[in-house]
Image (spheres, rainbow, N blue to C red):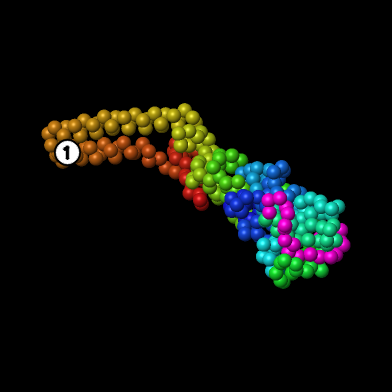
Amino acid sequence: YPSASNGAACLRPCGGAGMCPSFCGANRACCRRGDKKAPVECKGSTGFVDFAYTKGSSKDYHQCVQPGPAVAFKIKNCGEFDLNGLWVRTGVKSGRPRYTLAENGRAIMEWSESRAAWRLYIDETWLGYGRPTLYIATSTSATFPTSGWQAVDGIGPVPQVEAFGQSASPSLVQVGELEGSLALKGKADYGTHEAACNTDEEDLEKAGNWCLSKCPPGYRVKNTHTCEQVCGDTMPADSWGLCGTSAAEVHAVVAQTAAMVSNGAIKSYILIDDMRKTGVDGDNLAGTINTFIDMGKPFAHPKCPEFVDAEQSSATLPQQSKLVR
């Protein structure tokens, strides 16, 4: 799973889109790229992370990002605790910007023509009348004032207003390569991906869900756990797990093995059936054991040497070497 700063899905832990210091960190927002219904702080947000091998992209799910330019300032150490936090520009009032608290749209800062001052209040009314002014600043600045605030109906200390610093970093889009089997992870969480092999520290390659050491020279991968020796030199024929001088010779050995096993099976059946009818005796028991031994002999081929002489036996089993999981 990715971290909050590297493409983690944040909508559920944040409880919705918007500013989310609890999961994303201070001054960070939970947003989805191109979301037309996103809160204002997500408009123009940057820092989205897209990897080719993860499930979903920043257009599919919400990530922790740098909020957009609408985030204007932060209020802290205010005696009215409900005004503390990040503020976003949400419109225009009396020819100047209007701001609301990102976490509460009823907390408002706007220019008041009648008071000739900037006003901070919380609108808890239905029709907008009788709203108590908590703080005012007589500054005539074109945007939010950072000083000069005085308490009216609010309690001290007065708010400390700090401009919000935007990151100059553009949206981060990275592309990587990994096995395309992620498509099979239909139930995986957005932003997650399969584990990759650490090829920088070890000589490994990915096969399915395993990180495997590469087979040594003269061997090939048989399955995710085993290397198999490659047939060659004087025994180039490779069939049925055997190396031989020719394909016909290997097939003859296989046919002979099948015949010996079949005959042994019939003989053992007769001996076992005779013991069932007449009782166990030493001769029948010994005969049965010897039959099973004879049935296993066709499989006892010698292992292939690294270099095979022309005069050596014609059909042998490839060696197997366990791989590191």
Residue placed farthest to the left in the image?
A: 278
Q: Nearer the viewer, residue 166 or 213?
A: 166
Task: Identify the residue at horizontal 55%, vertical 40% (top origin).
Answer: 186
User: What range of the chain is rendered magenta?
Assistant: 125-144
Circle 1 Cα neighbour tier, 10 Å, few/some/many (<14 / 14–19 / ≥20) = few
Task: Give the residue number, with chain letter if any, for mark 1.
Answer: 283
State whether the magenta stretch is mostly helix, strand or loop: loop
- In the rendered image, residue 241, in percent from the top left (x then y), is placed at 46, 37
Q: Nearer the viewer, residue 109 or 217?
A: 109
Task: Identify the residue at horizontal 70%, vertical 62% (top origin).
Answer: 83
Say which amino acid is labelled 1.
Asp
Residue 43 sits above or below residue 160 on the image: above
Residue 176 sits above or below residue 27 on the image: above
- Kindly indicate the quadrant of the structure image that contains residue 188: top right
On whether residue 127 falls in the magenta region, the answer is: yes
On whether residue 14 falls in the magenta region, the answer is: no
Residue 48 in view of the camera: no
Task: Identify the residue at horizontal 12%, vertical 34% (top origin).
Answer: 278
Task: Identify the residue at horizontal 34%, vertical 38% (top origin).
Answer: 297
**Residue 139 vs residue 75: left or right?**
right
Q: Nearer the viewer, residue 249 or 161?
A: 161
